[in-house]
Amino acid sequence: MAAAGLALASHRRATAADPPREWIEPATGHRVVRLSDEPGSASLYFHQNAYTATGDKLVISVPDGLATVDLATRRPEPVVTGRVSHVVVGPRTRQVFYMKDGTVYATHLDTRATRAIVTRPELETGSGLTVNADETLLAGSYVESTAPAPPVPEPSANPLAAPPPQESRLEARWAQRLPMALYTIDVKTGDVKTIHHGGGDWINHVQFSPSDAARLMFCHEGPWHKVDRIWTIRSDGSGRRLMHARKIDMEIAGHEFWSHDGRTVWYDLQTPKSQEFWLAGVSLEGDQAVRYRLPREQWSVHFNVSPDGGLFAGDGGGPSSVAAPGNGQWIYLFRPTPAGLEAERLVDLSKHDYQLEPNVTFTPDGKRIVFRSSMHGASHVYAVEVARAASASGR
């Protein structure tokens, strides 16, 4: 279960011909379109907002920086050049926030006007950025010191050797016990404040509420069966609260994300790990809102929810996933029913390399699901229509 990131170079593979620009998925009848032009392009991590408030533009990662995609014409336009990280689009002002060479920047997606907010290289050592609902604050985590620590195992130099399992890498990084902290940045002044010291906790996946400008969510990263992972906190450091406490041995909960109205935290829940699978939601009051049971074949690395809260999406899992054997390699659409989640397959990902996580998001109009995939060789950004194509409706 990997953390956020845009380091995709290892997934860029040469291809003799460009992938198709669009097609009707034979197995499902849904239309799929390619949104990116350059091999090595990718959508953002599943909980990082990539869309303008009006829903007309999508920000994607490209080999030389960032680009926007006009969702009506599918036309990409470069917007930021150079190696960047920690990317998120503001919900109001059509700006993208990111880090580059130790500096936090804001760039307007239409004019490309760019402003340096603050230079603090240490902020790139953690997770973020996230931007609050009124775009007054950014937040993230950082490593407070870099004392000697046990090495994290890297893939073997032998190209034929299998890389170490993701969970072993999580265990090794977690065991380092690097002191980390949460911070906020005043977007106008660049003032940086540390609001919570985590000690040896690995602080990851920092997310502002989409509706409450002063509420953050973050996780204690690590082996999921050893951490109480999902927490919320106020932007002044007060009100820290655990949102889901593990109750049985080997129970895991994670890959948390907000509902669009900010009232519910959704997450992958397994009771215990690899045995029973749920998409679970908890209200901000701390009461269990709902649990939707999922069969093994429909479990996904990441889930997401539509803007109106009426649908969910999932990106499936590879042959070595926590749900293997038998996990499906599909982009899924889920419809809540009184009996649970009703799954519909949208895109066949049997040729996708799941070392690159697809990371599904709904477009702001709720009509398409955007994801990244290496199903045609190199990484590209695709979108699948939620409704079946008219040409396939009669089949």
Image (cartoon, grey):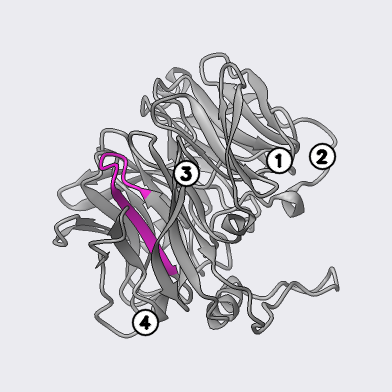
Horizontal and vertical percent position of residue 377 = 74, 44
What stretch of residues is rendered in magenta?
Answer: 208-220
Q: Which mark is residue 376?
A: 1
Judging by the rendered image, the residue that carries numbered circle 4 is 250
Horizontal and vertical percent position of residue 172 = 60, 80
The disc labelled 4 sits on which kind of residue? Met
Q: CA distance from mark 2 to mark 1?
A: 8 Å
Q: Residue at x 22, y 53 (%)?
A: 340
The disc labelled 3 sits on which kind of residue? Gln
Q: CA distance from mark 3 to mark 1?
A: 25 Å
Confirm or deny contact between disc 2 and disc 1 (CB under 8 A).
yes
Is label 4 in a helix, a strand or a loop?
Answer: loop
Q: Which mark is residue 48?
A: 3
Is 176 contained in the magenta span?
no
Decide which of 395, 50 is in the foreground and name it: 50
Nearer the camera: disc 4 or disc 1: 4
Decide which of 2, 99 is in the foreground and name it: 99
Judging by the rendered image, the residue that carries numbered circle 2 is 15
Q: Is residue 270 above or below residue 285?
A: below
Nearer the camera: disc 3 or disc 1: 3
Q: Is residue 56 above or below residue 99?
A: above
Between disc 2 and disc 4, whose residue precedes?
A: 2
Q: Is residue 13 above or below residue 318?
A: above
Q: Residue at x 75, y 72 (%)?
A: 155
Is 209 contained in the magenta span?
yes
Between disc 4 and disc 3, whose residue precedes?
A: 3
Nearer the camera: disc 2 or disc 3: 3
Is label 2 in a helix, a strand or a loop?
Answer: loop
The disc labelled 1 sits on which kind of residue? His
